[in-house]
Each structure stands twice: as structure tokens, then as C-alpha cells.
Image (cartoon, rainbow, N blue to C red):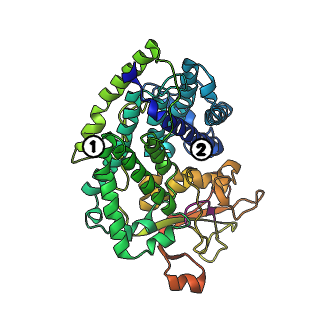
Amino acid sequence: MEWFTAPDYWLSRLVFQRALAGLYLFAFLTAALQFRALIGERGMLPVPRFVERVPPRRSPSLFHVYYSDRFFAGCAWAGCAVSAALLAGLDSLLPLWGGMLLWLVPWALYLSIVNVGQTWYAFGWESLLLEVGFLAVFLGNGEVGPPFVVLFLLRWILFRVEFGAGLIKMRGDECWRKLTCLDHHHETQPMPGPLSWYFHHLPKPLHRVEVAANHVTQLVVPFLLFTPRPVATAAASLMIVTQLWLVLSGNFAWLNWITIVLALSAVRFPADPPTVPDAPLWYVVVVLAVSALLLGLSFRPVRNMLSRRQVMNRSFDPLHLVNTYGAFGSVSRIRYEVVVEGTADEVPRKDSDWREYEFKGKPGDPRRWPRQFAPYHLRLDWLMWFAALSPAYAGPWFGALVERLLENDRDTLKLLRRSPFPADAPPRHIRARLFRYRYTTWRELRETGACWERTYVREFLPPTRLAEEAQRS
């Protein structure tokens, strides 16, 4: 069945699989280390409360059958272990069916997590990891050549990721059409990286070139993925370079990295393919049936992508098999940050000793330079960015966050860089204030050493204390 496989892409498959396993590892590690404070039994949005009101058909998950923090931790760490095994190449040591089952495990486990993760897992790269991870189940191992149709579907995902992102930009904010969005984006993006300040201060003509190049990469180059090599390889390579540029300029969890991994599957590496037997008939039937299903499910994402009312990052089925993507259809011109503070004073006053909580990734102290975290995902920091855009984004969970800080909850404090209060002396009151942040100029940086300058805007949350303490007083 020579028509079924593309043996020249055997090394592309190997690189793709190992890189994808590495991203799975980051995803499960993020879940294992953060879930208790976010969605655990005493989390801000507890899973038990969620599964009580949402039926399994809408969010298929192991945790509809049973949930405890210990069981969730076991699933997350099991996902880490399987991902590490795949990264080490265990699937290549198993028979074809065994390797497929091994790849199915992290997909099923991560689907179970995403489908109960609520707003903490409502990011496009969650669905993207699941969609790509499902296809990886059918990519095979060294017993067969890479199936041509699966390689095609991986390019189809990459096409939708890039072309969808390009369309949402052209239909959205006029600054993309005027080539001016990068005058603001590096300063107002959700989580700047260590080089974002420098990217922001690049000459404006270079920003125009960057935006124009982005439009070409997202609106023209994706079509070249379906041409013969070496054109397809060149197109995928250009996408990789573009994504690496984005990796340097910000912290976007594993969005850029999984796009790079997808592009690697379209790169034909110069290496002689090993001799392998023909694919067994059962494997051919399964792959073709799954491929037909996925192509059929592509109808709604394509319809959305071509619609004038295109939406970003939407799943159209509860298994996240085929989704629609897009990012930054609009770009903020001003950066706001919610600064959370606590005081030990019994009666809070303006001149009280208000101490600021420091988050790991989001801007806080103007003198603290941003760090690189991606592909690790700081979920609370990302949601704090949304909270600064509008209090409505924070409605479901911000009150619970404040309550946990008033209790000096250990799991919640682990999500932060530093708490200003000792473990045995929690604050009596918490407040939150909204500040406008802007990057300093070169001169201000030299004079003050601060990369940010911030200005108070308004109160976000008035001084608040635990209800039981308020009753006692």
C-alpha cells in the first residue's frame, strides 16, 4: 500500500512525536502543580461543584465518575509519567497497536482535565493540544511508514491555526490593517517576557515590517503547505521562524511551541527512510475512518473561519477533535493591572501598612523584570490580565481568591511569587487597586532601573475581610 504512507517523512514523524510528548509533559506538570488552588475541592472553582451542574455528555471526563484531589493528582502525575515515556520513545518499542494505545492515554487524561477546568482551561492552546494529540494516536510507529492522510490532517490543523489567526486580525482591530498594532502589543500583551521591553522599543518602521510579514505568514504562506516539497518544507520552516520570534517576544504558554511542533511535521528532513513492511489492513481502515470523521467535523470550524462574525478559539464538539483558532483580533492600547494588597491592621485606613502580593509572571513591582515561563502556563497570572480588562472576567473566581489569601491558604500562595505575610499571621484585610502600566523609556530605565511606570486609576475591590471575622467584630 505505497499510496497510504509517506516514508520520506519518517524522521519528521519522530521529531514531531517527541516534541509533542514534551508539550504534554508541560501541560500535565502545570495541572499537577496548580490544580488544588484553582479547581480542587477547596479551589476557587471546585470540580465537584462543576460536575454537579454540567452533564457528562457536555464535558466528558473521568471526574464525572469520581473526583477527589488525590485522584486528580494521580491522573496528572500519571500523565506526566506517560508523557515522559513517550518522550523517551517507549511507543517505538511496542507493537503498533500498543503504541497507539499509549498515545491515547495522555489525550484521554488531558481531555478529562480540560473538560472540568472551566475558565482556567478556556484557552485555545488547550483544544489545540487535544486536537493534535488525538491525531498523534494514528501516526504510527517504526512498524509502519507515516500515513499520508494523517500528515495531511496535521497540515490542515496548522493551516487553520495560522489562516484563522490572520483572518481574525484583518476583520478585527484596524491597527492590523494600518500595520500599527505592534506599537502597543508588546506592552499590553497578557504576560510580557524578558525581551518584550526591547521589542516594544524597536523602531516603528520595523514594527510595520513585522506586522506586514505576519500577514504574509498567516494569510498567504499557509496555502503553500499543500504544495509539493520543497515548497511545503520552506513554508513550514518560515512559520517556525515566525513562531520563534513570538517566543522571544512574550509568554504565550505552549501556543507558539505547539504551532512549531505542527510545522515540524511538514518539514521533510534529509534522511533515508528505513525499510518497513506494508501497513496492516486493520490500521489502514482505522486511519481512513478517523480521517473521514475529522474531515466531516471540519465543516463548522471552516464555516466559522469564513464568517464575517468569526469567533476565536471555539470547540464545536465536547471531545475537542476539530476546533477553530485565532488570537488578538483586537489589541489593547493601554495596559491595566490589578494590584492585590493586604494589611494586618484591625481597621483599614489609607495610611495603613498595605503590603503588595507578588505574582510570578504578571507585572507588579515596576523594578522587577519579567521572566520567561512559557511553555509553562501560569493560569492565575493570565486570568489576572483578563480581570484588569473587565471585572466581569473575574466575577466567578476573584472573591474566592481574596478569601484564600485572607486564610493564608498554602495551595493558593504557591501560585504566587511571594506573600508579604508570614504563614502564621494572615492579613486582616485584602484590597485590590487598578493601575495603568507603561514601559519606561531608555532614559527612565537608566535613571531608575525600572522597566515599568505605573499610575493609580481606581479602586478594584474595597478592603475586605473574612465574613466570620467581620461577624465577631
SS at mark 2 in the image: helix
Quadrant of the drawing holding the N terminus: top left
Q: Is residue 63 visible?
A: no
Task: Left or right? Give the position of 391 relative to 449.
Answer: left
Which residue has dot 1 on it?
305
Residue type for callout 1: Met
Q: Are marks 1 and 2 in contact (CB under 8 Å)?
A: no
Q: Residue at x 59, y 41 (%)?
A: 22
Residue type for callout 2: Phe
Q: Quadrant of residue 189?
A: bottom left
Q: Quadrant of residue 158?
A: top left
- Residue 472 x/y as whole percent: 68, 55
Numbered marks: total: 2
Residue 26: mark: 2
For the magenta stretch, what is the residue range? Answer: 357-363
SS at mark 1 in the image: helix
Q: Main secondary structure of the magenta part?
A: loop
- Residue 261 x/y as whole percent: 48, 43
Give the farthest residue toward the top.
281
Quadrant of the drawing holding the C terminus: bottom right
Instruction: Establish if 368 lies above or below 448.
Output: above
- Residue 443 x/y as whole percent: 52, 86
Q: Residue at x 42, y 26 (%)?
A: 147
